[in-house]
Image (spheres, helix red, strand yellow):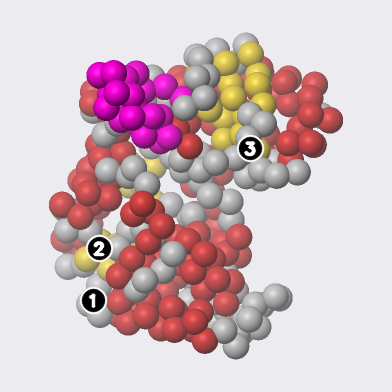
Amino acid sequence: MSCNPVPRNPAGADLGNALVVDKLDALRREIGGVARAVVAFSGGADSALVARVATDSLGADRALCVTAVSPSLAPEELADCGALAREWGLRWRTVETDELDDPEYAANGTDRCYRCKASLLTALTPLAEAESAVVFLGVNLDDLGDHRPGQRAAAERGARFPLVAAGLTKDDVRAVSRHLGLRTWDKPAAACLASRLPYGTPVTLATLSTVSAAESALRAMGFAQLRVRHYGDLARIELHGDDLVTAVSRRAEVVAAVQQAGYRYVTLDLEGFRSGNLNLALAGAERGAGRDGPAMTSDARGAP
């Protein structure tokens, strides 16, 4: 069983782009080279493309798409995974992960992502064994250049990264997705909610719930690409481009929405949205350690 056919000429797509077609063919070959697959499906552009191509290439009977559910997954993302599964005819299920029960994850050290992916693979491995399948993760070439120890945890446990093997960058993922007519082609980047906490800030259910409520309130106001960085009772909001101007013009609404979620102080980061920007603290810490001994890992701009 395969997905419903996609539009062959989505608005704005350049079907004459040979490079995009070549990238798609490479991805199809990489995914089609396995007998069965279990796809870690978070609903983002990367994992959505892998899930769709796996289902198209292998058939839904040989491609199982699995969404890991935990307090670090925003409710909107879980809902969209279900919607995509219905729209595309994916064979889809959810599985609960228990990373919050791991004291090392909850401590939020620089290896938090490693602990999270280890928990994910612990949940996916039995499913893959039952399916006699390979586990696929939506990691692209650009991801390899950031501090993402979760990739190591996944590779150590035998997971594969078909986007990397096929040579796809983040821009390639979006171009190929657009070529296929997938609505996820321009979906804003979404990372787990724990990524909103600076390293060393404990990850708790209450904190994740507060971040989630604040971000949900801002999305309801029409802000699509955003992060609410958590600093105790202070929220530092990152927005994309012209949304900064909009947020200032709607300042009272923004403040009220974020305070209702549980924050006392609400700030707007004038540098705007930067995916993974809390990892900048790691580079700063390494430079500081090289000069003066160990450095504290805080936000690169000295936010509280």
Circles 2 and 3: CB atoms closer than 8 Å: no
Q: Residue at x 27, y 27 (%)?
A: 290
Q: For this rendering, which residue is in front, 303 or 71? A: 303
Report how far apart the C-alphas of labels 2 and 3 lie in the structure: 33 Å
**Residue 295, image quadrant:** top left
In the image, taking residue 254 as reference, residue 274 lies left or right, namely left
Q: Is residue 284 above or below residue 60?
A: above
Residue corresponding to mark 2? 160
**Which residue appears farthest toward the right when viewing the image?**
249
Q: Amino acid at mark 2?
A: Arg
Query: Residue 150 in the image: x percent, y percent?
Result: 28, 45
Of the two numbered discs 3 and 1 in the rendering, the one whose residue sits closer to the viewer: 3
Q: Residues within 10 Å of mark 3 (few under 14, many from 20)?
A: some
The residue drawn where x is 23% and y is 26% is 104
* Front: mark 2 or 3: 3
Q: Is residue 21 above or below residue 47?
A: below
x and y percent of residue 160 in the render? 25, 63
Residue at horizontal 38%, vertical 19%?
A: 201
Disc 1 + disc 2, Cβ < 8 Å: yes
- Majority secondary structure in the magenta region: helix
Please give the label number shown on residue 272.
3
SS under mark 3: loop
Could you say whether the residue bearing mark 2 is in a helix, strand or loop? loop
Task: Tell me the distance, in whole angstroms, between the alpha carbons under discs 1 and 2.
Answer: 11 Å
Percent of width and height locating residue 112: 30, 33
Disc 1 marks which residue? 34
Q: Nearer the viewer, residue 4 or 304?
A: 304
Dot 1 amino acid type: Val
**219 or 229: which is nearer to us?**
229
Q: Which residues are magenta?
A: 279-299
Q: Earlier in the sequence, mark 1 or mark 2?
A: 1
